[in-house]
Image: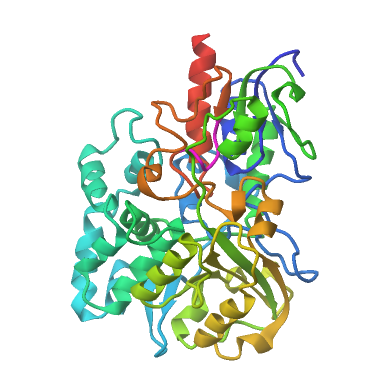
Amino acid sequence: MPSMLDAVVVGAGPNGLTAAVELARRGFSVAVHEALDTVGGGARTEELTLPGFRHDPCSAVHPLGIGSPAFKGMPLARHGLEWLQPELPLAHPFPDGTAALLSRSVGESAMSFGPADAGAYRRLVAPYLGHWDSLAADFLRTPWDGLPRDPYRYVRFGLDAIRPASMLARRFRGAKARGLLAGLAAHAIAPTSGLATGGIALLFALAAHEVGWPVPRGGSQAISDALASYLREQGGTIQTGTTVKRLDELPPARAYIFDTSPTALARIAGLGQAYWRYRYGASAFKIDYALSGPMPWTAEEARAAGTVHIGPTAAEIESALGAAVSGRAPEVPFLITAQPSVIDPTRAPEGKHVLWAYGHVPAGWEGDATEAVERQLERFAPGFRDLVLARAVAGPPQLAARNANYVGGDIACGAFSGLQTVIRPKLARVPYATSHPAVFICSSATPPGPGVHGMSGHHAAKAVWRRLRAR
């Protein structure tokens, strides 16, 4: 190892690993330091319940992963990453046994909403179909980073995206289209009346049609392991089990890149109150299940879906999110569930299944929402409880203890609300730089925000190599 490295990355989540790869493949010397014993951050896979049942503690389904410009530019398949596409990306069931669908087919999706809304949905997505690559490149970045690749669609999409999802839903008459749109927007962990939640919903819908909502064979750990393998191939090194408390504990380097929360960065790098305005959002309440058989969803379509949203109506979803954000535990939570073993038999013993589910609760909440979650699951899959072999429950304290970036259990590493929706972690032309000329941040607290897509790491690396070359 050279006496002085070009860059040291703190944190081996997808963004930290991506930043390291982007620098290493350009000839810079890079070392990654990770506090836990394995790489992964929010993209891990572990036997949380019983032997042979492989669960994803955080992320599970990856529309923005397979659609990521950063990941597409890397030979991750050669390093073991294989995407598996479920028969149906998303089902959004209703109590009568029917479901709104997000299919690879626009027509199938539109018809599931009913004839009154089919045309409105087609008109909503039509201008963007076939243009995923330019849309992803333009919107998975900081808005002021040069000219967009496709200015016309950038402006057109932006006019839709900046709206609250509740406003975008006014295009539709029926409960199915409105409920599905609200469920997509809820991935932001913010009320659907919030700024730019319409963009979240629309981006996820387009991803389903353009690239799918896949799972990695073997679990989300496969993404992190592929990035780590490629980094080592490029000459980068990774040291696990090393908790960093101060900047001077790290080896000498020309740049330090933090895949951490702004709070941790300020503490470690001695930046004082640099991010005192930065706000964290509501938490998740996560349960992983080992099941003796497949989920007995009443809606037949849900049995083949990789992801199932349990709402069902836009009003119920808004109420659940509003309660969590305002500090109240929802009595009827909105659930995002995934069933990767439907498409990936490596995730559970033969004939058995895993189920991944979370609802929203206030930040730092110490209560137990297990009964509320399972009541919702039973509502749409009667007999579900009879299949439960084991469960692993993680509320806000457990999520925060498992991953230091999840402050108060906020899996998005920052509230998706107000100006922080588009300006994170603070107003700056280069949001990845800090007041310290050698210190940078690349976590989900930076644009484009949460998700396993590596784009925050990609853009941070770009800022770093520009700075290094300028020197």
Q: Is residue 143 left or right of residue 220?
A: left
Front in this rendered view, residue 125 or 252: 252
Front in this rendered view, residue 174 or 29: 174
Q: Residue at x 35, y 72 (%)?
A: 314
Q: Residue at x 48, y 18 (%)?
A: 466
The image quadrant of residue 391 is bottom right
Q: Does residue 326 lie above or below 237 as drawn?
A: below
Front in this rendered view, residue 306 or 414: 414
Q: Is residue 10 left or right of residue 330?
A: right
Residue 283 position in % (x across, y down) = 55, 59
Q: Main secondary structure of the magenta part?
A: loop
Q: Does residue 457 lie above or below 178 as drawn?
A: above
Residue 55 position in % (x across, y down) = 68, 64
Counting the numbered discs, the total is 0
Residue 322 position in % (x across, y down) = 42, 65
Range of magenta residues: 441-446
